[in-house]
Amino acid sequence: MFTDINLSKERPAYLQIKEYIKHMISKGMLQEGQKLPSTRELSVILHVSRNTVIEAYNCLKDEGFIDIVNGKGTFVMFKAVNCMEACNIKWQKRISSEARLADQLDIMKHGITYKKGMISFTSIAPDEKYFDLDNLKRAFLDRIPLEGKKILNYGYAKGYRPLMRYLLKYMESKGLDTDGKDILVTNGFTEGFDLVLSALCDKGQKVVCENPTHNTAIKIFKLHGLDTIGVRLDSDGMNLDELSKALSENDVRLAYLIPSYHNPTGIVMPPEKRAEILTVFGKYNLPVIEDGFNEELRYSGSHVAPLIACNGKGNNVIYIGSFSKILFPGLRVGWVIGDKSLISYMESLKRSRNIHTSAFDQALLYQYLNEGNFERYIKKVRKIYKEKYQLAISCTKESIPCKNISGEGGLHIFIELDRNIDSRIVLEQCYKKGVVFTPGDIFYTDNTGKNTLRIGFSRVENEDIIKGIKIIGEVIRKLLVQGVYSQ
């Protein structure tokens, strides 16, 4: 039977031998008390060195599967489990309502399936070919000797202290008054957002947000059982009259905004509007979650301070930040800055759920940032993404008949189509031609936006941006001629 082992060069041979024998014992093909071939015999059968077999046998002995008796040989000492009559649960009947809802809202699972060779405008993640891998490696080599083995042990729920200090300074450079505020490091935006909602909201309460807004936020609102009130977006942000009306007529628990490079529209709220909107929220003593989405990808104009900085010494703004859309999404490091008392409760929530964000990842990111690499990296990619952004805008204006194109920076643009053309019908036709994008209705809180779509250009080559947008335009023009509109 040992001749069945097919050894691969990709893994150590002794591990493969160990795992093969272990599998045979576990399945009962090698019985308790059965004698195994000697190390010399097995090395000849498998055409490996005797030391390789000795190492495999030693591992099996350490794990309690065999016993090596001097002068007698090697024997199986593990008794295979006799499986009872099979118990098969119908899991569909056991799934919770939350899991069912999460499945329904999973656009990655239930959306259009990407096929190799397609032009995909669905992603707004950074393009990995521009990742600064050399300096990340150097940061690793610099940090590990300083931290030693302890960096692989448990860390603190609030975060890795050097990174926390760096991020607070980073936010101070954006104008933040850190007095009375604290920071919590998270596994990216999604966990930070979930923790804030868990700390401040109970099921059935009402929250207000922009309409449209980040699809992930809508999904998490629903999973928390919250009633979402969407406020119409003007070209400069939330419509203030509609916002005031919503707040006066409803008992709202908190607000969620993306003031810079809004997802999906790309709108940047001007400073004057930020001041006005903070005044409205202040009137109602309302907590505000600020999503610091893509703030660094500014292609023109001056820096606009985040809401939490505009708020001065006020403590009602909670800022959620992340480098995921511009640096290394795989590291999964984000942060929440807010009032110290709120962060204290969130620290306990964080500790109860996943103990802490990877201290190793945090230390690596800190070293990379502290050596000044981020500033150099963002300068390089800002130029690259600016060219893609300008190309996407130019191609859209030339090829797609539409009411409006929005997007002042970041990694995407948002398009409102003419005459209520249904973007899902457009997507269906484009899919047949090898082009996919994100239909805009998933960003709306009230099932509207059927004539909108988002074009993510960050991971698409320039020639494919031109080709893909041209195909989208051709499909839309054909549908306009046919009179195919949304209902």
Image (spheres, rainbow, N blue to C red):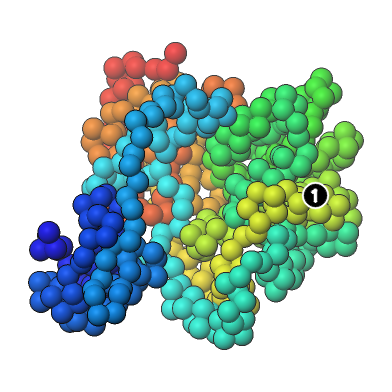
Relative to residue 425, is residue 219 drawn left or right? Answer: right
Relative to residue 88, is residue 333 drawn left or right? Answer: right
Question: Which residue sits furthest front?
Answer: 72
Residue 422, picture quadrant: top left
x, y percent for residue 85 = 34, 30
x, y percent for residue 333 = 59, 60
Quarter of the figure with the C terminus: top left
Look at label 1 and name its amino acid: Tyr
Residue 71, picture quadrant: bottom left
Q: Nearer the viewer, residue 75 or 55?
A: 75
Q: Is residue 271 above or below residue 164?
A: above
Relative to residue 395, is residue 450 drawn left or right? Answer: right
Q: Residue at x 28, y 34 (%)?
A: 431
x, y percent for residue 293 = 61, 51
Mark 1 secondary-structure assignment: helix
Q: Residue at x 69, y 45 (%)?
A: 195
